[in-house]
Image: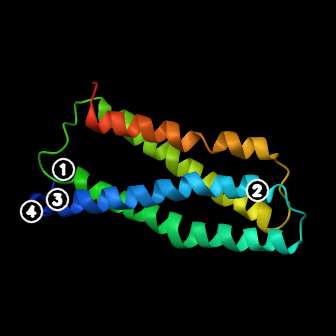
């Protein structure tokens, strides 16, 4: 199903989708780094409380709105006539990767609550590894969209 008039706005829709995606990815790269540094603080300390504020603001003011905008403009692109060959396999891989990125986003939000309530039990190494997952997903997504290997 497509909506014809969306073709008129394609360049703007694509631009806003890319802008939102860049903001989302920037936050997804930075938040687990904050968690790595937060692990080294004493619960209840001024430094720990400062990290809590930084993490909340990053998630609530940047990452969440950027993810919503990415999804919104991405759905508009899917509904734009002539953009998507539903028989192609690349978009299935892209969609699966975006869903995985969204699930990871949910995990980041849940981990923030652990820090908020001074209940983090994961080591900094865990967050260092989690910090690499968005990079892998971004590579897959970009390759699927640009190269369209299948």
Nearer to the camera, 93 or 136 = 136
Query: Which numbered circle lies on residue 11?
Result: 3
Tell me if residue 134 comes above or below residue 116 in the rendering: above
Q: Are marks 4 and 1 in contact (CB under 8 Å)?
A: no
* Rendering coords of residue 79 (x, y %): 21, 54
User: Which residue is disc 4 drawn over?
Assistant: 8
> Which secondary structure, mark 3?
helix
Is tag 2's residue or tag 4's residue first in the polypeptide sequence? Answer: 4
The CA span between labels 2 and 4 is 46 Å
Spot occupied by residue 43 in the image (x, y as percentages of width and height): 89, 66
> Is residue 33 left or right of 5 when viewed as pictured?
right
Which one is nearer the viewer's eye here, 42 or 115? 42
Q: Is residue 83 above or below residue 118?
A: above
Give the residue at mark 2.
Answer: 37
Gap in Å between the C-alphas at discs 3 and 1? 20 Å
Mark 4 or mark 1, which is nearer to you? Answer: 4
Residue furthest toward the top? 150
Query: Which quadrant: the C terminus?
Result: top left
Local crowd size for mark 1, using a 10 Å CA cut-off: few (<14), some (14–19), many (≥20)? few
In the image, which disc is placed on residue 112?
none
The Cα–Cα distance between marks 4 and 3, rounded to whole angstroms, is 8 Å
Occupied quadrant, residue 128: top right
In the rendered image, residue 24, in percent from the top left (x then y), is placed at 47, 58
Q: Earlier in the sequence, mark 4 or mark 1?
A: 1
Element type where label 4 sits in the image = helix
Q: How many marks?
A: 4
The x and y percentages for residue 83 are: 17, 45
Identified at 44% across, 64% down, the residue is 66
């Amino acid at each position: 199903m497509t909506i014809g008039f969306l073709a008129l706005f394609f360049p703007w829709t694509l631009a806003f989708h890319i802008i939102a995606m860049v903001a989302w990815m920037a936050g997804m790269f930075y938040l687990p780094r904050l968690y790595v540094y937060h692990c080294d603080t004493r619960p209840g300390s001024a430094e720990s409380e400062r990290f809590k504020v930084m993490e909340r603001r990053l998630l609530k003011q940047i990452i969440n709105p950027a993810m919503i905008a990415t999804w919104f403009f991405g759905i508009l692109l899917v509904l734009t006539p002539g953009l998507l060959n539903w028989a192609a396999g690349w978009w299935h891989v892209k969609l699966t990767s975006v869903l995985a990125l969204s699930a990871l986003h949910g995990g980041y939000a849940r981990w923030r609550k652990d820090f908020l309530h001074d209940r983090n039990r994961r080591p900094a190494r865990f967050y260092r590894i989690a910090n690499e997952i968005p990079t892998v997903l971004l590579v897959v997504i970009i390759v699927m969209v640009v190269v369209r290997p299948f």
